[in-house]
Image: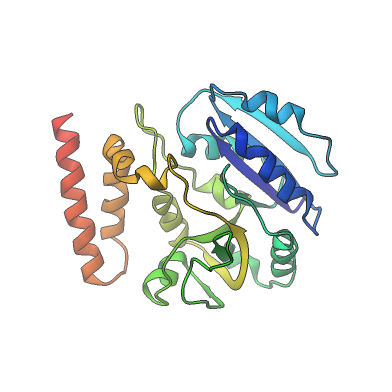
Amino acid sequence: MLITILTPTFNRARFLPQIYRSLCRQHCRDFEWLVIDDGSTDDTEATCTALPVADFPIRYIRKENGGKHTAINAGVKVAHGELTLILDSDDELPADALAIIANQWNDTTNREELGGLCGYMAHRDGSVIGRPRIEARCTSIDLRYRYGVTGDMCEIYKTSVLREFPFPEYPGERFVPEALVWSRIARKYKLKVFGQVVYLRDYLDGGLTSKIVEIRHNSPKATCRCYLEMMQLDIPFKYKLKALLNYIRFKQRIIKI
């Protein structure tokens, strides 16, 4: 199997049929959908069970609540795909997304140096989120600081690489910045960046993005680790200085706790 679509979810049952419909529209069928329920208290399990049988595998796994990063770790351990795309529960894929990803991967040589692929995201009105559009083989660090690409991107990592670089889990904390793990991967692997949109999203109230400051404050150890490792990257000084100031701010929160 080429691709695992990994959906970590918590109390977002109402959005899962939307993902299901977008997956049913895919031109490429060489994938599975793996739903990791992070201890939901709504009808997530019943919603998944009630979905019509599709011509792609659907697997539902429930775990104790621990945060999105722990759900990703749990899913990566059992994923069957060579590649893993993390699809949040309130987002969806355009109909040609998986075909584009498959073609990009099948046309790729020298895969050993690659941790995976990286495409673009767009809002549902069609406006592209990442700017500028580039095509390159580069690390995620170079993507941001050499090419100056801003905005969220759609990383599709080798499943083996995600197993090699799991999200750290801190007792009592429910959040780990994805940038921490993506930067760790970038120290060893490049990404093949292509300019096509393969992911659709809008920012909804109540999601991680809308409450990110509060969430970071409630997970100071993971946040500090992210800023500490950011200071060690080969990036412009102004970004290291900003990371230092944020590290000090969250370190003080750890001391107070």
Residue placed at 42% from the left, 77% from the top?
A: 147
* Residue lying at the far front of the rendered structure: 125
Give the percent coordinates (x, y) of residue 161.
Answer: 56, 52
Q: Is residue 78 visible?
A: no
Q: Is residue 64 left or right of residue 58?
A: left
Residue at 41%, 58% (x, y): give it: 183
Nearer to me, 14 or 44: 14
Taking the spot 55% from the left edge, 62% from the top edge, the residue there is: 121
Whole-percent x, y for residue 90 in the image: 56, 44
Residue 139 in the image: x percent, y percent?
47, 68
**Picture mark count:** 0
Quadrant where the C terminus sits is top left
Left-right relation of 182 to 116:
left
Residue at 36% across, 27% down: 171
82 or 49, which is in the foreground? 49
Asked if residue 194 can be seen in this view, the reply is yes
- Which percent across, then down, holds residue 149? 43, 72
**Display coloring:** rainbow
Judge left or right: residue 45 versus residue 65: right
